[in-house]
Image (cartoon, rainbow, N blue to C red):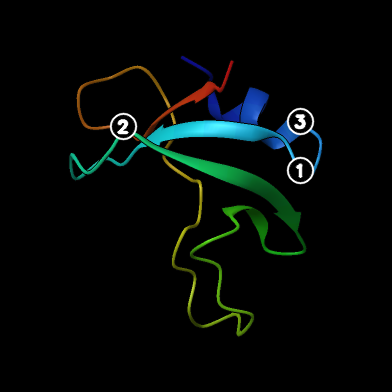
Amino acid sequence: MLTQEEVNELPDGTEIIVTWSGGNGPHTYILRQTEYGPHTEDHFLKEPMWKNGELSFVGKEKYHTKVRLAL
């Protein structure tokens, strides 16, 4: 599992696997590093007020969003 800092440093276009903090997943996404921070390609809406797919609260604790590299 990656930390928030590690996700923030991944290059744009990296394939990742995400299990969301609410329990949905795991799902494969393409990471997009945007001016609003890291997002999943399938969920990012380009208006700043809507941040679906935002990769924040990433970590190893029970209620964190879990991110790992796709192999």
39 up-or-down from 13: above or below: below
Q: Nearer the viewer, residue 1 or 16?
A: 16
Q: Mark 3 or 2 closer to N-term? A: 3
Q: Is residue 67 left or right of residue 14?
A: left
Question: What kind of residue is marked 1?
Answer: Gly
The total number of labels drawn is 3
The kind of residue on which mark 3 rests is Glu
Q: Which amino acid, mark 2?
A: His
Rendered location of residue 34, percent (x, y): 74, 60
Q: Is residue 66 above or below residue 23?
A: above
Mark toward the viewer: 3 or 1 = 1
Q: Is residue 36 left or right of residue 58?
A: right
- Name the residue beneath numbered marker 1: 13
Q: Which residue is mark 2?
A: 64
CA–CA distance in space, label 2 to label 1: 22 Å
- Relative image position of residue 3 (x, y in whole percent): 53, 21
Q: Residues within 10 Å of mark 1 (few under 14, many from 20)?
A: few
Q: Which residue is mark 3?
A: 9
Which numbered disc covers residue 34? none
